[in-house]
């Protein structure tokens, strides 16, 4: 019986050489989906996990700031000290040295050679002794009471405060006459700022007057007393000036300050005109056309 079967080539086993990628690729049957190849997996934090970690670190930083500085960063103002808290910063056991002026607290630890307890300015530490900065009484005036000081004295205290801002580290505010328990400025602090500005304005007006009418030359000898004279043909006069000044009254509970007073000053000024008036007075015993006058009063003006 004749066979009608078609002869087929014997199957051969595929090459086992896998060193060549081309051979490996050739062994894969056509039309069969290939299993995707993946890089080795890397374990890491997802975006949500990273955000959670950041929030935890931020919360920890805020808590540390509250414990150390008494405030929450970005959420509140500067730390507000009580007088009892400030009194602890006096350098005992190598602790920090803090002082306050006009209710603002500064870390003066780097100036320990000046502010340590046994040094020249140690009495300023741990308190607000604003008054003593201008009176020089380092026993009876170690207080924050400045209500009866002149505008010029208050201006000097404000300048001391500016010095501490430039030189030392600002730490916060002190609850008291200048700031309330939340650190907000009081009416008394606003009155202080007004007095300082008024004194500055008076100084500026004084400089303008001196530029307009130059001061006289003054000479004093034991035998002749005081003599004033003007050069360039000018005439000496006693110039009376009324400038903004006087302490006025500090702000009360309503925050309103009383009306400011005025300060009257006198000095010898040189005028090109020979005339005189109530504010441009002649010196006693000196003719109006003289360029030099002896002062008969006890002190030269």
Image (cartoon, rainbow, N blue to C red):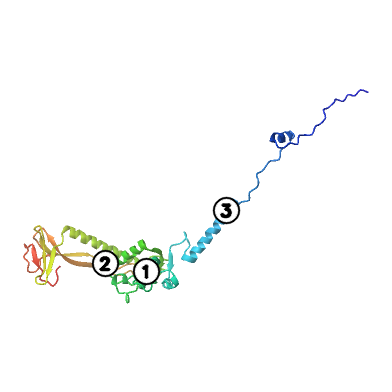
Q: Do the residues labelled 3 and 1 touch (CB within 8 Å)?
A: no
Q: Is mark 3 on a helix, strand or loop?
A: helix
Check disc 2: other Cα within 10 Å, few if <14, some if 14-19, many if 20+.
Answer: many
193 or 142, which lies in front?
142
Mark 3 Cα-neighbour bin, 10 Å: few <14, some 14–19, many ≥20: few
Q: Mark 2 points at which residue?
A: 152
| Residue at (35% x, 66% y) in the render | 189
Where is 235 relative to 135, above or below? above
Q: How far apart are marks 2 and 1 (CA)?
A: 30 Å
Q: In which quarter of the image is the C terminus?
A: bottom left
Q: Which residue is drawn at the image coordinates 56% and 54% (left, top)?
A: 51
Viewer-proximal residue, 176 or 207?
207
Q: Residue 113 carries which label?
A: 1
Q: Residue at x 18, y 58 (%)?
A: 211
Q: Which of the labelled discs sits on residue 50, or is there none?
A: 3
Residue 156 versus residue 272 in the image, above or below? below
Q: In which quarter of the image is the N terminus?
A: top right
Q: Residue at x 13, y 63 (%)?
A: 217
Q: Determine which quarter of the picture holds residue 228.
A: bottom left
Tell whether 50 sits left or right of 99.
Answer: right
Q: Where is residue 60 in the image (x, y as percent from the top left)?
A: 53, 61
Query: Which of the marked residues, 3 or 1, is nearer the chain's N terminus?
Result: 3
Instruction: Residue 31: tell me if it is visible.
Output: no
Element at badge 1?
Answer: helix
Q: Can residue 51 be seen in this view?
A: yes
Q: Alpha carbon of mark 3 to alpha carbon of mark 1: how far? A: 48 Å
Point out residue 96 in the picture as x, y percentages from the top left corner: 43, 68
Q: In the rendered view, does 125 fall on the left or right side of 275?
A: right
């Amino acid at each position: 019986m004749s066979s009608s079967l078609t002869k087929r080539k014997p199957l051969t086993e595929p090459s086992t050489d896998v060193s060549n990628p081309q051979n490996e690729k050739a062994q894969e049957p056509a039309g069969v989906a290939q299993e995707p190849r993946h890089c080795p997996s890397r374990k890491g934090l997802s975006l949500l996990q990273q955000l959670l970690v950041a929030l935890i670190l931020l919360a920890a930083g805020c808590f540390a700031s509250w414990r150390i500085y008494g405030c929450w960063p970005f959420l509140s103002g500067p730390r507000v000290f009580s007088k009892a808290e400030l009194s602890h910063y006096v350098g005992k056991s190598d602790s920090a040295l803090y002082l306050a002026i006009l209710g603002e607290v500064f870390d003066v630890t780097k100036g320990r050679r000046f502010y340590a307890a046994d040094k020249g300015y140690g009495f300023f530490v741990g308190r607000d002794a604003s008054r003593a900065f201008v009176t020089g009484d380092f026993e009876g005036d170690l207080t924050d009471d400045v209500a009866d000081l002149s505008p010029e004295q208050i201006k000097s205290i404000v300048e001391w405060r500016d010095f501490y801002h430039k030189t030392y580290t600002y730490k916060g505010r002190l609850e008291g006459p200048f700031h309330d328990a939340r650190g907000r400025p009081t009416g008394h602090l606003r009155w202080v700022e007004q007095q300082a500005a008024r004194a500055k304005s008076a100084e500026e007006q004084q400089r303008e007057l001196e530029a307009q009418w130059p001061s006289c030359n003054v000479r004093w000898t034991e035998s002749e007393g005081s003599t004033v004279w003007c050069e360039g043909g000018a005439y000496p006069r006693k110039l009376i000036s009324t400038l903004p000044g006087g302490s006025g009254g500090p702000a009360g509970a309503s925050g309103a300050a009383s009306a400011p007073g005025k300060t009257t000053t006198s000095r010898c000024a040189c005028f090109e005109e020979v005339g005189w008036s109530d504010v441009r007075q002649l010196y006693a015993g000196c003719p109006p056309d003289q360029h030099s006058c002896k002062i008969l009063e006890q002190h030269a003006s």
